[in-house]
Image (cartoon, rainbow, N blue to C red):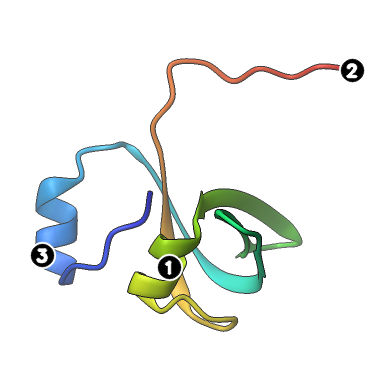
Amino acid sequence: TMYKKTKEEFNHKNKARNQIKGKVLSVSEGAVNSEVELDLGNGQTIVSIITKSSVESLDIKVGDEVTAIIKASSVMLGK
């Protein structure tokens, strides 16, 4: 989930320690969810899957500066 707030509101309400700023590289919209790819710099990217309605309400577009908020108890990988 992404939030559209003032910087002060955003920092006060989000106590997640893992916040990463990035620039939107691409937005791929599906029927329900959208894939948003962020450029973190130094050749690193991260992808977030959020609802299509969140992309629309936040007006997320390629080139926008956004913050990824990572809150997870585990990260699973498979091969």
* Tag 1 and tag 2, C-beta contact below 8 Å: no
Q: Where 30 sits versus 24, above or below?
A: above
Residue at x 18% of width, y 67% of height: 5
x, y percentage for residue 21?
A: 45, 61
Identify residue for label 1. 66
Tell whether 66 sits left or right of 8: right
Identify residue for label 3. 8
- Mark 3 or 2: in front is 2
Tell whether 9 sits left or right of 7: left
* Crowding at mark 2 (Cα within 10 Å: few <14, some 14-19, many 20+): few
x, y percentage for residue 25?
A: 66, 73
How far, Cα to Cα, is label 1 from label 3?
Answer: 15 Å
* Crowding at mark 1 (Cα within 10 Å: few <14, some 14-19, many 20+): some
User: Splitting the image into 4 quarters, where does residue 9 fall?
Assistant: bottom left
- Which SS class for mark 3? helix
User: Splitting the image into 4 quarters, where does residue 56 fall?
Assistant: bottom left
**Viewer-closest of 5 and 58:** 58
How far, Cα to Cα, is label 3 from label 2?
Answer: 41 Å
Residue at x 40% of width, y 79% of height: 59
Residue type at mark 3?
Glu
x, y percentage for residue 30?
A: 65, 60
Residue 37 got which mark? none
Q: Where 19 sits versus 76, above or below?
A: below
Identify residue for label 2. 79
- Which SS class for mark 1? strand
**Viewer-closest of 72 and 44:** 72
**Viewer-closest of 38 and 28:** 28
x, y percentage for residue 43?
A: 76, 61
Residue type at mark 2?
Lys
Tell whether 26 sits left or right of 67: right
Residue at x 81% of width, y 16% of height: 78
Labels 3 and 2: the sequence-earlier one? 3
